[in-house]
Image (tube, rainbow, N blue to C red):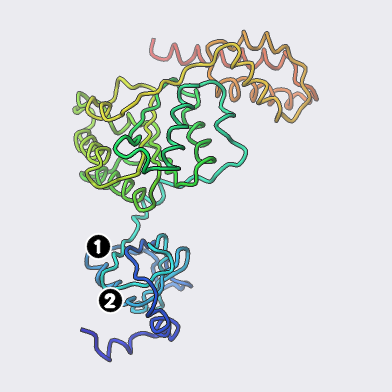
């Protein structure tokens, strides 16, 4: 029950008058906030903000902001704290609605907010730019068609997909290209970021990740190096939290938490190390293979277009020299090392001697790794 004393606590006439103006607007179903701190600083204040009881915070926030309009990327202020503590409105559903007694108010876990980002669309990257990987690109086209018309698929919607293959074969690159062609949130995350320090931490992080993705659907979660958290349970003796993490991941992938229209793409270099139960949840496993001769030549040509030196190279010879290398190896270990060698020697043209230098350098590094534990 509200009292006159409580109304007097509101210091801002702007927020108070806004309540009267918004009486005819649509009510908000859900508001997601992020604590951003005080508008200014002095020595006696600490910007740290910790919620000890999320349900209690929701009641507290809803009661003091009742009737206020919420717009995404704007702010709400807790006027019971001096000076006013600010919260950024990350999601308002619907946008421009007003807070009612039934509005759900959630606070983003800052930790999960830091480890997952909706990637920025790179206008220069298209799916057609990916060399090879025909099977993977076809599957991605299915995702695009699904997200364009989810109702058409019904119960046959794509849900969980596994990308696997050697490092540098384009798993992450394809997902980034996908982000450029879709107008939906894409959450990219390293699996190791989901590992917590205490019992229950990992399960909470996994739940928060899927919860964040479900707040703006349809959306895609891409978990790189998924084997780091979905280890086979035979590794229980090595990592005591394996069972906890696997069970949490299974719960979210099964959609028990109502993660409708959330597509999960996992990536791993070694699918055999995955827990069988997790692996069985992936409806399709797509292998990323090393490029063939024709594809390696195309990779070389594409990358040489952006190289900041003139070049005089035997493309057929380099294509043969790089057999067994991934696209990333060709760019990072061969072309980049050769370019840096040319620049260091004040050469204005990239030639085969620089390529041979990088090949030799790459060979030495590989030999060092091979003999590490002999």
Q: Secondary structure at mark 2?
A: helix
Left or right of residue 238, residue 137 in this image: right
Q: Quadrant of the C terminus?
A: top left
Q: Nearer the viewer, residue 158 or 274?
A: 158
Q: Residue at x 22, y 40 (%)?
A: 251
Q: Residue at x 24, y 43 (%)?
A: 203
Seen in the image, is 40 located left or right of residue 78?
Answer: right
Q: Position of residue 163 (x, y in %)?
A: 40, 27
Specify which label sits upstream in the sequence, 1 or 2: 1
| Image position, residue 53 (x, y; %) | 22, 63
- Up-down: is 374 above or below 135? above
Q: Residue at x 31, y 61 (%)?
A: 106
Compared across the picture, whether 49 is left or right of 256 comes to: right
Residue 32: mark in rendering = none
Residue that appears at 62% across and 19% down = 334
In the foreground, 284 or 163: 284
Which residue is most to the front?
152
Q: Can you tell which of label 1 and label 2 is closer to the viewer? A: 2
Task: Pick out the residue farthest to the right.
Answer: 348
Q: How many marks?
A: 2
Front in this rendered view, residue 156 or 344 = 156
Estimate how packed mark 2 is, as few (under 14), some (14 to 19) or many (20 or more) residues with alpha carbons within 10 Å. Answer: some
Which residue is label 2 attached to?
Answer: 63
Placement of 88 over or under 171, stated as above or below:
below
User: What residue would you read off at disc 1?
Assistant: 54
């Amino acid at each position: 029950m509200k009292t006159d004393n409580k109304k007097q606590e509101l210091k801002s006439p702007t927020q108070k008058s806004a309540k009267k103006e918004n009486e005819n607007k649509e009510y908000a179903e859900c508001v997601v906030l992020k604590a951003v701190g005080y508008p200014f600083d002095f020595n006696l204040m600490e910007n740290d903000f910790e919620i000890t009881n999320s349900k209690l915070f929701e009641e507290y926030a809803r009661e003091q902001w009742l009737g206020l309009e919420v717009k995404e990327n704007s702010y709400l202020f807790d006027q019971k704290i001096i000076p006013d503590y600010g919260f950024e409105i990350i999601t308002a559903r619907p946008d421009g609605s007003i807070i009612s007694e039934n509005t759900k108010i959630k606070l983003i876990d800052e930790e999960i907010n830091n480890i997952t980002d909706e990637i920025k669309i790179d206008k220069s990257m298209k799916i057609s730019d990916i060399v090879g990987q025909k099977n993977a690109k076809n599957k991605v086209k299915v995702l695009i068609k699904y997200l364009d018309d989810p109702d058409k698929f019904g119960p046959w919607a794509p849900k969980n997909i596994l990308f696997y293959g050697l490092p540098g074969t384009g798993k992450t690159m394809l997902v980034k290209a996908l982000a450029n062609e879709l107008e939906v949130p894409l959450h990219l995350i390293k699996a190791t970021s989901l590992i917590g320090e205490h019992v229950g931490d990992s399960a909470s992080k996994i739940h928060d990740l899927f919860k964040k993705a479900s707040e703006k659907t349809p959306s895609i979660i891409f978990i790189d190096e998924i084997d780091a958290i979905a280890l086979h349970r035979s590794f229980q003796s090595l990592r005591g939290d394996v069972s906890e993490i696997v069970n949490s991941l299974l719960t979210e992938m099964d959609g028990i938490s109502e993660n409708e229209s959330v597509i999960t793409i996992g990536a791993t270099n070694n699918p055999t190390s995955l827990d069988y139960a997790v692996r069985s949840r992936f409806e399709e496993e797509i292998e990323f293979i090393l490029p063939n001769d024709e594809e390696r030549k195309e990779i070389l040509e594409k990358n040489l277009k952006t190289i900041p030196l003139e070049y005089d190279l035997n493309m057929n010879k380099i294509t043969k020299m790089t057999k067994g290398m991934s696209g990333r190896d060709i760019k990072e270990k061969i072309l980049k090392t050769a370019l840096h060698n040319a620049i260091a020697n004040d050469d204005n043209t990239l030639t085969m001697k620089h390529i041979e230098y990088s090949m030799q350098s790459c060979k030495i590094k590989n030999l060092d790794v091979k003999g590490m534990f002999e």
